[in-house]
Image: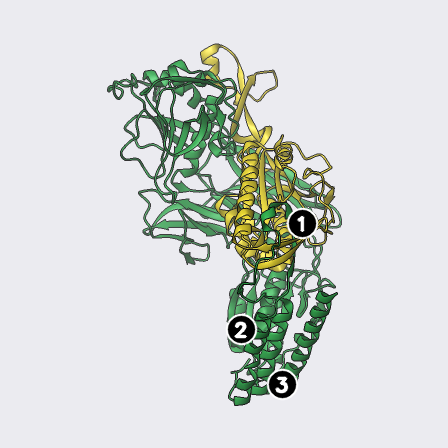
Amino acid sequence: MGPLTFTAPLGLLGLLAVPAVLALHLFRRRRRERRAAALFLFAPEARSTLAGRRWRPPVVTASLILELLAALLLGLAQGGLSLRGAPPHLVLVLDASPSMGARGAGGQSAIERARAEALEAARALGRDALVTLVVPGEPPAVALGPRAPAALLGPALEAVRPEIAGGDPAAAGALARGIAGDGGRVLLLTDATPAADAAAGVEVRAVGEALPNAGVAAAFRRPGGAGARSERVLVEVAGFSGGPLERTVRLVAVDGAEERELGRRPARLQAGEPVPLEWTVPATTLPLAVRLDPPDALVADDEVLLLPEPPGEVRAADRLPADPGIGPAPEGEGATLSGVVRFGGKLSRDLRLARALAAVPGVRVVGADAEADLFFAAAPAATLPPWAVEVVVRAPAGAARAFTGPFLVDAAHPLLADVSLAGVYWVAAGDGLAGRPLVEAGGRALVAEEEAADGAGPVRVVLDLDPARSTLASSPDWPVLVANLVERARARRPGPGPANVRLGDRIEFRRGTAAGADLVLVEPDGSRREPLAGAAASWSARRLGAHRLEASGKEVARFAVHLGDPRESDLRGRGSGVTAAATTAGEARPEGARPLRPWLALLVLAALCGDWYALAKRSS
Amino acid sequence: MRAECAAAAAPFRLAMPRGAAAGAVGDRPGFGTGASLDFQDFRDYVPGDDLRRLDWRAYARCDRLQVRLYRAEVAPWVDVVADLSASMTVTERKERATRDLVEALVAWSERAGGRPRRLRAGGQPFADADAEAVTGGDAPTLVPRVPLRPRGVRVLVSDLLRERDPAPDIARLGAGASGLVVIQVLDPWELDPEVEGPVELVDAEGGARLELDLDEVAVDGYRARLRRLIEAADRATRAAGGTFVSVAAGEPRALFRGELLRRRVIEPWR
């Protein structure tokens, strides 16, 4: 739309009708009707009374709005509002989902055909055409423009790679329709056969090809068990074809340029039915690759790279005193046996802490002064790592009170998952807890959680408990509660998240005190990306293959991204065809200067008709 | 789902409760035993058990051979219970927000690895909230007429503006669930009516009429009763181990990024 011209004094005079309409409505009032869902919430005091009239603002009704609109449009029509012409505008939506990388018998991929179609469509509009390139995603993104010169389209199309997962072409089409406005043309290039009910104003051109394809639908790499020297590789392979597909699934260890085959299995894939495969292999730090032979139409789902998952071990430290109220445990209280620090204090024994922690996998008990993720203490520590979880068992201070079966204030809290406390005899000796109460009895909090409002800093869980006289430690709830505490500590521990993620999922790295702020993710093609804002640094995985995470120039973690999306692997429904835009706005054309007076007059007439209808309806 | 709603819902997924859930095979902690890394329980060894799962520490302590059981990984059932009575359509904005919310919850559940199902409050399963018709009267109960899937996650979307106490229905919805979320959708006018003078209120469900002077006294009284109703629903939900959220109907972007995100009903996905 060109610049707006508004220089006629008659138009200003016409606009005086607006306050006139407002004044008329101000002095004329009717009881307004309103649909409501809760009449019972209005009490008798609200019933209508015969009180005298008071000044009130005008009631906003459809009639008022339509009359104001008619007056405003009349003023604009008097002013001679017009639009200046604009060059043709083409908005292209390029589907960049992984399936667009599929190659048929001709050797050309769908995205290559789509690029050629896009360039041809831009060329047909002439040299002064403007183009906008929209790429579906979550959310859809504008890759070029809006309204960029058509000469820039070629490089922008080449930069779009078929590696965007989860994008909805319909949502991108809606965005493109909004950018195009009234005069622009929207062309969606995809590989899915166009539906008959395509979005209004969007021309769909499908450049896909229905092809048989097999792919890795899911792949995991997991340790073989606690302390095991083996690990398991779990793979799910799926075929998408009219008949069965024969494939060989190979597992290889990748050591730089060298590869060593660890196993191979034949797989007969029926249409749409995933085939699970499992290997148990010696534990290794090398990347493992799962490959399908022979490669087929979509190469992206024929190989999955699996890196070793980072250790999920939680370090637990016992800082409970030998005797409550006397002080911390003396040096040497926690003797070492077989490399494991024993819990030696009386409170620890009363709490059966060692036994409860031994039942939770992935926990290493460390010395009281060592750096840890989970602390058990009788008093809050002055300084703790910001990611730590501290469990404070308060020593007896006030008059003891006993309760049976305290109740959970918030049963959905993660720390209370699967905890019931039914039948537990609880002796509390404190005089009330601060923080958010989790467990209560007799009007006092027995367990409370303290955490900074912004989530920064350690989490403190305080128990008002005399373990020697309570049955909590011998109840089944205690190891469950300890396991929940361990899981909380594990989730807050600094370091990398899962090493193997699917395309579109999140790559995460939780910052600790040691990690610098300048984290950079290096993608397989060498692109360097800053993290998204948040407590944990995170990136959306948008490239397939091995990624490197650097902090201050040094590598701190590695991640591997694979496709793992059967919807993309299934190429049976792909095809070609054209659906014309459903409205006249589908054709881009140069626009000359157009007076808007006839249109405004029509709108005035429509507003007056609407006003008449609204008034007639209210009268009836 | 509308494109605008889909775009606003895209960055989120349902925050699944940590409680053990039941469902099809997936990647969430489940109720039974399976092959995940999450320890669940011990049981006595029987011949044929995997020797790698024997707990040698327990054997050293008490001379009993026991195997460690690990939690199953499932795609939890998610039952989205939608109140599609006429009271949800008092304004187009409220109706639109209700339908958007139901469809978004289904999409969020799928994104979180769940298996969602749409159910009418007091009625049967349905396929698409955008196409489902609204019933005239108020259903006698909010609980669907089909059995809810055991140990699944249940989400109720309703305005809870009923003369009957909603607590028994909420308790029934929470019974046997691994997680419960109650989302109260209210039109901004219902949440905070303005002093607007003489009005005639028409009951959306029964058609009853009430002539009022909506002055300060009437509005203050209404707000106090609504607050008590919300507090009662919140208490009932918490007692059932669930999370209660009250939201104002509005555009999807504002609707999803408000209380739902703050109360961790949903969480950022990408």
Q: Residue furthest top?
A: B63
Q: Nearer the viewer, residue A320 or A135?
A: A320
What is the x, y in percent for residue A224? 51, 30
The residue that label 2 is drawn on is A153
The tag on residue A597 is 3
Tag 1, which chain? B
Camera sees residue A569 = no
What is the x, y in percent for residue A514? 31, 43
The tag on residue B109 is none
| For residue A57, side relative to residue A105 (left or right) | left
Q: Which chain is green?
A: A
Q: Residues within 10 Å of mark 1 (few under 14, many from 20)?
A: many
Residue name at image x 57 percent, y 53 percent: B9
Q: Residues within 10 Å of mark 2 (few under 14, many from 20)?
A: many
Amino acid type of disc 2? Leu
Q: State the SS at label 1.
A: helix
The residue that label 1 is drawn on is B87
Q: Nearer the viewer, residue A478 or A503?
A: A478
Tag 2, which chain? A
